[in-house]
Image (cartoon, rainbow, N blue to C red):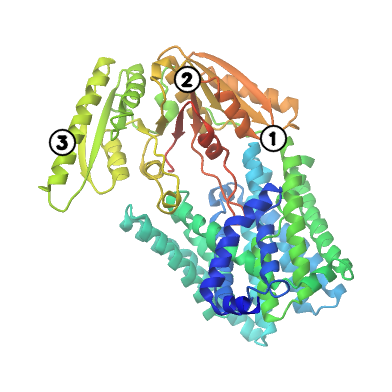
Amino acid sequence: METFRSLVLESPLAAFTIMLLVSLTLPQVFERLRLPGLVGLLFAGVILGPNVLGLLDANGETEKLFSDIGKIYLMFVAALEIDLKEFSRSRDRSLTFGFLTFAVPMIGGTLLGRWIGFGWNSSVLIGSLMASHTLLAYPIVMRLGVSRNEAVTVTVGATIFTDIAALLVLAVCVSIHGGEFSTLAFTGQLISLAIYAAVILFGLDWAGKRYFQQAGDDQGNKFLFILLAVFLSAAGAQIINVDKIVGAFLAGLAVNDVVGDGPVKEKVEFFGSVLFIPFFFICMGLLLDVPIFIEALTTRLAVTVGIVATLMLTKLGAAAIAAKLFRYSWTQMWTMWSLSLPQVAATLAAALVGLQVGLLTPTIFNGVIVLMLVTSLAGSIITGRVARNLPLSSPIIHSTHEDDWADWLVPDLPKAGPFTVVVPISNPVTQRYLIEMAALIARYKKGQIIPVAIAPAHVHMDDPKLVADLGQARQLLRAAEAISTSLGTPAYPRTRIGDDVAAGISRTAREQNAQLIVMGWSPSQGLRAKLFGTLIDDVFWAAHCPVAVTRLKTEPVNMRRILIPVKTITPQTIRTIRFGQVFADTHAAAIILLHVCDRHTPESQIVAFKQALEDSIQQGPAVNYELEVSYHDDPAAVILKASRTMDLVILRSMRRRTAGGLAVSDVTHEVLAGLTCSVVLFGEPHT
């Protein structure tokens, strides 16, 4: 065993392999036990660390490297996930609550540090650890459909203030601890930090927009640009004697608007959530001293309880003051408190820095780990219980003519020319059903379809392979035109040559001023799809109009019962329902709207939800419909059970956020994997 241990410790490759294995297995095991996956990573770090097996060393080169990279990436992703548009809508109140939920815990934590016996510098740092918060429970309010409630948006916006302020306090405390503090030095530090922040926030934003315009559809280089921006910012922070996590957070804010919610952001978060951030939590576990941790829960329990209690009480006080100022309800106050409770990203990163420079003792560091575990669980549980009592978000519904359903799909789309549906053709096996669906929808609006086939480009235009591909494309298009004509819908085929299939589809749709793209299902969901994206992802990202991705098991005219799951009533949801109404009206089918809600949802809220849904349905095409409400904790299971008696399920494409850098589950993905009937995934352009 000793020989094996020494071999592992001396081999960076062995350490890397062990951390990969842990990241792959442990989070899933702990999530099945209904515990956060990051708890499993911390547990693995403790077991593999010097206190138990001794297979990994916190001071090893590999572990230190990935700990630093993970710490940087964690703060970058935390900034990247902040919704700046939501912040701008409630900026003044967000800043007010941000100041309160920073200042009150800051004061409480500082006084606690002094009571424990720390000096002012360490006490202020302890206070700053409690002043920030991580939106770990944000996916819960999204699932409940209350993410647009003002109390939620204010809390989300406050994250910007609390995280930046906490990191600035960390920078000052580290500078003082290093013996570099004086009035002149402090002033110089603030000036250099202000200049550095301006360069990062405005310089990276400008450079990112310019580079993304020039890079076009090259997602690989865009991803590399983002990585370079993150680590260049982190290195620049060290030059001005500021911790690198400050630079990483500023870089995330700088490129937030540039990256948007497209495939590049997904790749950035994917790499972080499966590699860098899990490694960071494993390395955090390596730093946990088991005897000291046990001591923190036994003989030093008063200190640990003091840390947790101070955090919870001061955060509650800040939420109560804000609710009083803004005249919020008790439910909104409790929601703000529960959302601002979890201490993960900035807290852990700053605590690690404090431990490494000697400002914090191992006892306090272990207490912070306990704080993270308690607040993560408590924040999520409390949010789930109180946020369900918030009023559901109401959609912004524009009045329109009953039969002018294209306005519902894309309200701002130019109406010049006939209604046009673009249909990419590549698979002769599935093309008939695809063309039939597109033709039915186009005929409903007295429009046309544009079948398009894209042949892969070659260096030489006389390449025999290209000639063969063009011949096959023309054959597919002739068949598509015949199918469409038989259904009474004119078709105008197009052939394109290009290296990028997604770009060819989206550009054809733009050139033809299409109102809809109907395309076939891409089954690729493996590692390559996660790394480089799928054709569907790329079309969703680039298209100017809605995209209906289909997996059809029977002829569209035989689809008599259409299921549409509805989580919340938003303009995007209404347009998805409208698509279902139009398709149902083409052949006198019926739609079933299914809403799965929490078991504790108030009856009054359900009644209001059903009334709002009925009002919106009645403004669209007149079709037979049913409203079904189910109380269940597993929406995917309910949808899959209901789908057994359906011919078609229409799902809305929706990209989920991540929490604390770790991916959250997606009901849509689970449903797609289990459906046996036909399915349409309806998505809108990201812009």
Q: Position of residue 175 (x, y in %)?
A: 65, 81
Of 51 and 85, which appears nearest the observer?
A: 51
- Whether residue 401 can be seen here: no
Element under disc 2: helix
Of 268 and 473, which appears nearest the observer?
A: 473
Q: Position of residue 585 (x, y in %)?
A: 44, 15
Of 282 and 88, which appears nearest the observer?
A: 282
Residue 353: quarter of image? bottom right
Identify the residue shown where x is 64% and y is 60%.
161
Q: Quadrant of the N terminus?
A: bottom right
Identify the residue shown where x is 67% and y is 49%.
31
Q: Is residue 623 above or below residue 67?
A: above
The residue singled out by tag 2 in the image is 581
Q: Which mark is residue 473?
A: none
The residue under label 3 is which amino acid type? Gly
The residue singled out by tag 3 in the image is 471
The residue under label 2 is which amino acid type? Gln
